[in-house]
Image (spheres, grey):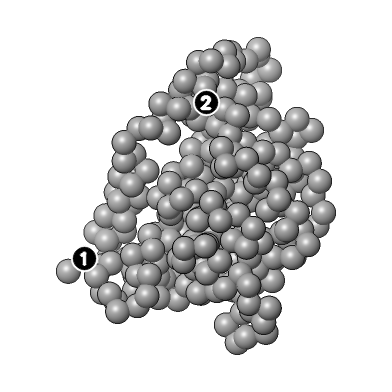
Amino acid sequence: MEAHQIRPNIDHWQDRVDLAAAFRWTARLDMHEAVANHFSFAVNDDGTQFLMNPNQVHFSRIKASELLLLDANDPNALDKPDAPDATAWGLHGAIHRHCPHARCAMHVHSIHATVLASLADSRLPAIDQNSAIFHNRVVIDENYGGLAFEEEGARCAALFSDPKQKVMIMGNHGVLIIGETVAETFNRLYYFERAAETYIRALQTGQPLRILPDDVAEKTAQELEDYPEQDERHLGELKAILDEESCNYAT
């Protein structure tokens, strides 16, 4: 029996398994930060009810059955025994309250994305195929205001006004990725970190950059967006690896 079939009686089980696998693999890639950072996934039609990691549990230990089920419109969410982290609630609650197109949201302080967010010019030029994925698909937050409690979360959510933009470079902070599925969002998170690393390493050479023309970058971005099933196959392979290792993520 496959690991994701162990608890079929729990609501939103497959979504829970996918999200738990994304947490585990993010930790393996060292893109997490201690017991901070959060992923969430909306499970109802209007996007206001969502799964999220429990308060201050390490990504490498998160299990599908232990994910919190929260309501973005619940004024008492932080007063309950299983309350989420207050900054996670501030950011992800706001995203799921104000951005129904953001079914999934992943926020990390991964090294290269955060280096990019720390530069005075945080744009990511299309210097290779991976960075071309994000051509005209990134919004940059230039007004960091402290920890992402509710006011800061609402301000960030308002920046996702263009549905085409699926990445927020959070200036002086990190990165926030949104998408329609866990697989799509994790795939985007993975490739953004790879693209940011390539760019940072290219800058370190001190040599001129070979930047793609806008039309080629846009063509490449669209081709990759239309590439069939790559994101699902990516996450599927990661789950297969975890299952072969008898990992307990899907319990």
Q: Which residue is mark 1?
A: 2
Q: Which residue is mark 2?
A: 132
The amino acid on which the numbered mark 1 sits, given as a three-letter code, is: Glu
Label 2 amino acid? Ala
Instruction: Pinpoint residue 171: horizontal percent, then vertical percent.
Output: 74, 43
User: To which quarter of the image does residue 205 belong?
Assistant: top right
Q: Residue at x 81, y 46 (%)?
A: 143
Q: Left or right: where does residue 230 sit relative to residue 87?
A: left
Residue 138 shows up from this direction: yes
Q: Is residue 11 left or right of residue 3?
A: right
Which residue is at a point 62% across and 24% down the rendered structure image? 125
Eyeballing the image, is 141 above or below 56?
A: above
Q: Residue extending furthest left?
A: 1
Circle 2 or circle 1, nearest the eye: 2
Image location (x, y in percent) of residue 158: 71, 50
- Element type where label 1 sits in the image: loop
Q: Is residue 186 visible?
A: no
Residue 245 appears in which quarter of the rendering? bottom left
Q: Residue at x 43, y 52 (%)?
A: 181
Q: Nearer the viewer, residue 128 or 97?
A: 97
Q: Residue furthest front?
A: 46
Q: Horizontal and vertical percent for residue 241?
A: 29, 54
